[in-house]
Image: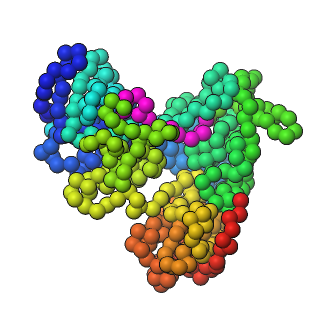
Amino acid sequence: MSSRDHPSGAGSEVESFDHVIVGSGQAASTLLAALPRDETVAVIEGSAVGGTCVNTGCTPTKALVASAKMAHMARRAADYGVGVEGVAVDFAAVMERMNRIRHASRDGLVERYESAEHITLVRGWARFVAARTLRVELAAGGGERTLRGEHVYLNVGARARVPGVPGLDTVPWLDNVRLLELEDLPEQLLVLGGSYVGLEFGQLFHRLGSRVRIVEAADQLMGREDRDVAEAVRGLLEDEGLAVALNARVERVEASAEGVALVLAGEEGERRLAGSHLLVAAGRRPNGDWLDLERAGVEVDERGYVRVDDMLRTSAEGVFALGDMNGRGAFTHTSVNDAEIVLDLMRGGPRRLSSRSAVYAMFIDPPLGRVGLSEREALERGHRVLRATKPFASMSRAIELGEPEGFVKVLVDADTELFLGASVFGVRGDEIVATFALAMNAGITWRDFRTTVLPHPTIAEMMPWTLDGLESVPSEIVA
């Protein structure tokens, strides 16, 4: 599987591979599907194979969202003329379903890696000892291995950021990983942070039966989104029964009779929020601080993200940084696209990081789909912006589904007539936003998009009709 070179370090030999991938997340799977089968590949993984998406991100959380949605819709059955009595959530069964799904995904990847003759799966934690050379502390049985790759791909992801709140280290608290290991449903869940992770978990645990309070220091939820979108999401959550506190600066965390308490500072003095559990969802920070990157000549920025160029190359020859750790996207699909750009580079192709539009979804229910620029970003960049909005309550399919909440907002450049961005907050918004992503990637003008005929009755068919409402946006930025 590999060649052995000269001895290195404490008597260990250097095993040489054509490719060494550090971290087994989704960028790794994309690389492994396309790298030549006659070239040797080592995949180094110290934790669970599959990375964040399979083990603690997309797969388990969306399984939980589905269970929470089912509970929510069962409680609403009478709205559809269906009689359902005694809706009850079996939290153990919910978690068992989630684990069955994520473990099947992980085990399938392990089987794939271990059955491929050209792939060596090395279970352990790596650190650089020289250029393109890593020493791996093996996870089982102790010992070390030293690996060198002609090409090295860093794909170690990110983890929850721990804010410097006084007292946090004195109480038990949850992050997105530990929350998935709960055996009992939290009675009262405090969520510190009002962005994507906090809102998704907050809503789904509320629907499963927890009392949820979301605490956000800023004056709106989801700081990267436009205020109209953030306010619509807030209204939806509050209508469901979640408590949302904005402008809520946490002075300290302390133990309470219930379990844990957040002490908030305000103009009227301190106030105290108590709960049985605390989820800290205050952002992410890149992994890689244990990799000894400086020994390989890999530069990082002031936030710890690895610096990359337009083809994901780092400052070290032959070393690429993919996924969350490069700070150029924090999603599975951007990690996959990173790998595709690198593969295209090896084939002499033209793909570049700078050519992709930001596209993502937040999987509250209904979901928010986003592509391109927000309204604020478009104005800050000097575009003459045209805007069109349409409420889901005006769409027959949303009414038929019994889910009329939300709206779509589309932004167009008045000079080029090309799309700048779109926000689709409503039923199936995570899927429908793809229509705008495709239009932006293909360079389709809004006029050509408007003539597209889509099937009835669907939500998507209304996206071209939304453009009939295009109006100029004032150039000043409204806070």
Residue 78 falls left or right of residue 32 = right
Residue 180 appears at what percent x and percent y?
Answer: 52, 35
Residue 156 at x, y percent in the picture: 38, 37
Residue at the location (54% across, 52% down)? 363
Q: Is residue 383 above or below residue 228?
A: below
Q: Quadrant of the C terminus?
A: bottom right
Residues 449 and 419: in front is 419
Residue in the foreground of this view, choosing between 25 and 152: 152
Which residue lies at the image location 39% right of the left edge and 72% below the top edge? 442
Asked if residue 358 lies left or right of residue 472, the reply is left
Q: What main secondary structure does the magenta stretch of the protein show?
A: loop
Magenta run includes residue 289: yes
Count of numbered tags:
0
> Where in the figure is residue 272, as x and y percent of width and height?
79, 32
User: Which residue is drawn at the image coordinates 25% and 37% (left, top)?
Assistant: 20
Q: Is residue 391 visible?
A: yes
Magenta part of the chain: 280-293
